Image: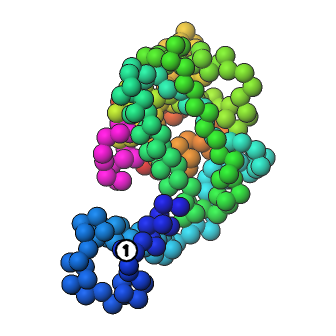
């Protein structure tokens, strides 16, 4: 909606015809704000033209294929995500910014260029945001795991062998300004093995960093189909960000 309004912007008193025939003097008559909004219009229109020219994959997106295979079309699907940072009002503001960037990342991953079938599952995508200041403030991964295992009635499309967690490190990584090429390797949340037992798997941590930009196309199909166990995905280096097998 916001992009649509930006694409239609005209300075006060201007028409489309005047804009099409605008002279240097016309542009110089604009205030800084008016000219800035006009520049934004051109940017939005240029991006839209680029998007329309992008090739569309003839095959289903990986997450669509997984949803179809598990007969989940028409049902909720997505992730359980736990917030563990609550220190002060500033943390609340940072959390809002994190959620905005999360939504932007998910929207990019829902782009039709990733494959066909996205429209049939898009409206059923859900995130169960768990925000419990008393129980989760500063919580480690063991506490996140315990909390998840006490949740009642998790929808099957969100009930995976791993849940997601956002702590100070992951929050900071997402809010840090990076280029789109860098972001896949630097912006992360934590994937937490919900069935991990320390005494049974001492060689594994039971959690790892996963790229926020790899959640739908790479991580979700694995979680939904359970074709690989969490420990098979876990990088050896604790600080490495898992970004999918093709990364």
Residue 231 locus on image (x, y percent): 54, 28
The mark tally for this picture is 1
- Check if residue 214 falls in the magenta segment: no
Q: Establish if 78 lies above or below 109.
A: above
Q: Establish if 111 lies above or below 147.
A: below
- Residue of label 1: 12
Q: Residue at x 58, y 63 (%)?
A: 112
- Tag 1 secondary structure: loop
- Check if residue 180 falls in the magenta segment: yes
Range of magenta residues: 173-185
Residue 235 seen from this side: no
Residue 217 seen from this side: yes
Nearer-the-camera pick, 179 or 37: 37
Residue 227 locus on image (x, y percent): 65, 39
Residue 122 locus on image (x, y percent): 65, 53
| Number of residues whose C-alpha sits closer than 10 Å to that of mark 1, classed few (under 14), some (14–19) or many (20 or more) | few
Q: Residue at x 36, y 84 (%)?
A: 19
Q: Residue at x 37, y 74 (%)?
A: 12
Nearer-the-camera pick, 47 or 214: 47
Q: Establish if 191 lies above or below 39.
A: above
Q: Is residue 162 left or right of residue 154?
A: left
Q: Establish if 147 lies above or below 60.
A: above
Q: Residue at x 40, y 33 (%)?
A: 93
Nearer-the-camera pick, 109 or 40: 40
Q: What main secondary structure does the magenta stretch of the protein show?
A: helix
Quarter occupied by residue 81: top right
């Amino acid at each position: 909606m916001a992009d649509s309004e930006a694409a239609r912007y005209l300075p006060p008193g201007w028409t489309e015809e005047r804009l099409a025939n605008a002279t240097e003097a016309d542009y110089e008559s604009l205030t800084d704000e008016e000219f800035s909004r006009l520049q934004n219009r051109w940017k939005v229109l240029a991006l839209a033209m680029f998007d329309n020219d992008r090739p569309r994959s003839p095959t289903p997106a990986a997450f669509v294929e997984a949803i179809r295979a598990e007969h989940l079309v028409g049902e909720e699907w997505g992730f359980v995500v736990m917030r563990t940072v609550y220190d002060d009002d500033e943390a609340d503001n940072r959390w809002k910014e994190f959620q905005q960037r999360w939504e932007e990342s998910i929207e990019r991953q829902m782009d039709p260029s990733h494959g066909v079938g996205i429209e049939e599952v898009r409206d059923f995508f859900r995130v169960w945001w768990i925000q419990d200041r008393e129980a989760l403030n500063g919580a480690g991964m063991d506490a996140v795991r315990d909390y998840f295992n006490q949740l009642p009635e998790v929808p099957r499309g969100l009930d995976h062998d791993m849940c997601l967690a956002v702590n100070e490190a992951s929050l900071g990584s997402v809010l840090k300004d990076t280029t789109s090429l860098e972001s896949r390797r630097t912006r992360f949340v934590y994937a937490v093995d919900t069935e991990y037992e320390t005494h049974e798997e001492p060689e594994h941590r039971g959690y790892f960093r996963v790229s926020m930009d790899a959640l739908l196309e790479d991580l979700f199909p694995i979680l939904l189909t359970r074709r690989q166990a969490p420990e098979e995905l876990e990088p050896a280096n604790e600080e490495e960000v898992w970004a999918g097998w093709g990364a």
